[in-house]
């Protein structure tokens, strides 16, 4: 996927091909992993101060509508965006905030059972499964339920995910 093909898809869906959209699309394609709209807007604004954050949000919405990106809420934080090039589910450690990308194929049997047993179709793209990662489950790393999650020793959700394939 390159910027021109994405801009062509936006135009085919009725959107305009502007220089601001080109910059935003290039930034989205260059982003590594998960990125919030604010992080993306801040990065773009440093290089192109005339591009307004509302333009970034509208372009992200348009990119999601045409299937180029997905957004997901990782745990209790803000929505993050990532390219929709691979189907996967997010596992988020509520202690260290590590993000593990689980191939969608691992979740399909459960989703089929939910649809069959409850006549309910799940849109799994917009939610994360929250729990404790392997490191945080170690007995010596346990904390009391009242203790807040530590930001040390973990990876943030922005762009630093591991793949479990």
Image (cartoon, rainbow, N blue to C red):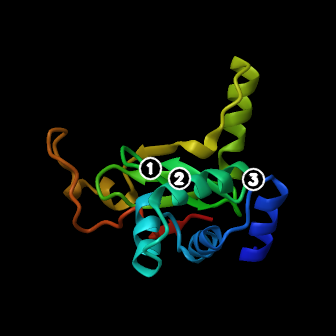
- Report the disc number at residue 74: 1
Which quadrant of the structure image shows residue 59?
A: bottom right
Q: Residue 5 at x, y = what percent?
A: 80, 71
Asked whether the beta carbons under mark 1 and mark 2 sit within 8 Å of each other, the answer is yes
How far apart marks 2 and 3 lie (CA) works out to: 22 Å
Q: Quick one: which residue is furthest to the bottom in this view? A: 47
- Report the disc number at residue 144: none
Please give left or right for residue 99 compared with residue 65 in the image: left
Please report whichever mark, 2 or 3, sits nearer to the chain's N-terminal start: 3
Q: Secondary structure at mark 1?
A: loop
Please report whichever mark, 3 or 1, sits nearer to the chain's N-terminal start: 3
- Report the disc number at residue 90: 2
Front-lying residue, 132 or 40: 40
Label 2 neighbourhood size at 10 Å, few (<14), some (14-19), many (20+)?
A: many
Mark 1 or mark 2: which is in front?
1
Please report whichever mark, 1 or 2, sits nearer to the chain's N-terminal start: 1
Find disc 3 in the rendering and name its residue: 66
Q: Secondary structure at mark 2?
A: strand
Q: Secondary structure at mark 3?
A: loop
Asked whether the beta carbons under mark 2 and mark 3 sit within 8 Å of each other, the answer is no
Label 1 neighbourhood size at 10 Å, few (<14), some (14-19), many (20+)?
A: many
Tell me the quarter of the image containing the C terminus.
Answer: bottom right
Front-lying residue, 131 or 35: 35
Mark 3 or mark 1: which is in front?
3
Tell me the quarter of the image containing the N terminus.
Answer: bottom right
Q: Quick one: which residue is furthest to the top in this view? A: 118
Mark 2 or mark 3: which is in front?
3
Please give left or right for residue 76 compared with residue 63 in the image: left
């Amino acid at each position: 996927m390159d910027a021109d093909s994405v801009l062509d898809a936006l135009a085919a869906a009725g959107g305009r091909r502007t220089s601001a959209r080109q910059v935003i699309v290039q930034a989205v394609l260059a982003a590594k992993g998960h990125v919030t709209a604010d992080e993306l807007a801040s990065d773009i604004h440093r290089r192109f101060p005339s591009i307004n954050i509302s333009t970034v949000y509208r372009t992200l919405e348009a990119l999601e509508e045409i299937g180029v990106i997905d957004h997901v809420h990782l745990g209790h934080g803000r929505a993050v965006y990532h390219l929709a090039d691979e189907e996967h589910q997010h596992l988020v450690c509520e202690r260290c905030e590590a993000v593990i990308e689980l191939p969608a194929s691992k979740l399909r049997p459960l989703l089929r059972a939910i649809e069959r047993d409850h006549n309910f179709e799940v849109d799994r793209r917009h939610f994360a499964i929250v729990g404790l990662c392997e490191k945080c489950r170690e007995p010596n790393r346990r904390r009391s339920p009242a203790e807040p999650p530590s930001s040390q020793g973990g990876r943030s959700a922005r762009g630093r995910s591991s793949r479990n394939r």
